[in-house]
Amino acid sequence: MSQFASIPIVPPPALPVPPVPVPPPLPASVEFTGDRNGFLHLVARGAGLELVTLGFYRFWLVTDIRRHLWSNTVIDGDAAEYTGRARELLIGFLIALAILVPIYLAYFLVSVEAEHWQALASIPLIAAFFVFGEFAIYRARRYRLTRTVWRGVRFWMDGSGWLYALHASVWMLLTAVTLGLAWPWRAAALERYKMQHSWYGDLQGRFEGSGWEFFKRIWWLYLVTPLALLLFPALPFLYAHYKTVEWRWWVSGIRFGDVTLESKLQSDALQGLYWKTIGWYMLLGTVFATLVGAVAALVGGLGGAAAGAAAGPDALMQNIPLLVVTVIGYMALALALSVVTRLYLTRDLWAKILATTVVTNIAAAANVTGKGELASAVGEGIADGLDVAGF
């Protein structure tokens, strides 16, 4: 009995405790809270002031539009903020004019002195303006980022605008040589450059979309677009589909540190916006043409049918009332089209993109340190002067 009593009792080995699964981070909510009627009133009022000020008010209008869009863009319960000012855009545009006007004037003088060389001289001028425009696009983006604040931290951008313009130009040459096939790779390369130089505080951005991924989604457009150019109803459908794919590809490639964006935009999500825009363009154009035609008929009737027939349309266009109606009507038409474009292809498109965007691991942006300096608006002014500003 004593021998059995001396045997130690060994407890059974402990069973391994299975690891507790860590749930994936929940996506942050993204929404747009702006009032559509309020935005329509904003752009309609701005268009009227642009007409009165001969376009001078556009700097204030663009600033108000951005403030409306930024302040109603809510991510994880917090809205963004746009801190840019209209005076900055105005000063940037005036500086851009001081740069661009001498270039235009020099080209005009050269073309007058050597008229037979004008066609060849336009080639380097167009090339120079393309490079200059790409530089302006990069600098305009830098300006807008440094005026964008979320949770008290500023976005900002470094990198070289001229180096970006060089990349864009080389890729454009390659795109032309390949008849457009290199376009998806060009878009991916330029986005990678822009995003790797984009920051949220000390959180660096990057772009993970690839040109091959973009190409796989749009390759069939290369085959059907030449046929669609002959069929008006087909081309807007294809373009709206292309923009949808481009937006989904672009948004889903954006990263800031561990913060990930993904777009759930459906393939037909933008069709209605583009067709509504086209419908309004056609309606407003018809109203303008009808108005000018009615005034021309009235002026011709008052002057006598025989005199009107003898004078012809050239003399009729020299009639002051008709010229006044035509010029004012054309300006009103242009501003009305801008209201339509801003409503459908800026505000409504912005809202659709946000409503279908998912942000994952937003907590990675919680403890960032503010960095970066404000950029000047000269790049935005040059882009505006070259009509490549976009939004």
Image (spheres, rainbow, N blue to C red):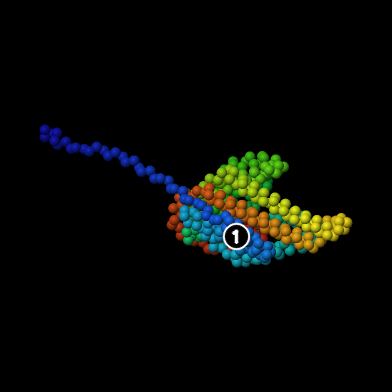
Q: Residue at x 14, y 36 (%)?
A: 6
Q: Nearer the viewer, residue 212 or 347?
A: 347
- Label 1 neighbourhood size at 10 Å, few (<14), some (14-19), many (20+)? some
Give the quadrant of residue 16: top left
Instruction: Kindly tell me whether residue 136 is visible in this rendering.
Output: no
Q: Residue at x 51, y 61 (%)?
A: 372
Q: Secondary structure at mark 1?
A: helix
Against 11, is 260 above or below? below
| Quadrant placement of the N terminus | top left
Q: Nearer the viewer, residue 296 or 360?
A: 296
Give the quadrant of residue 347: bottom right
Provide the residue designation for mark 1: 42
Type of residue at label 1? Leu
Against 248, is 313 above or below? below
Q: Nearer the viewer, residue 169 or 357?
A: 357
Q: Is residue 106 left or right of residue 208?
A: right
Indicate the position of residue 302 as horizontal and vertical percent values. 83, 60
Q: How many marks?
A: 1
In this view, the residue farthest toward the left is 1
Give the quadrant of residue 128: bottom right
| Quadrant placement of the C terminus | bottom right
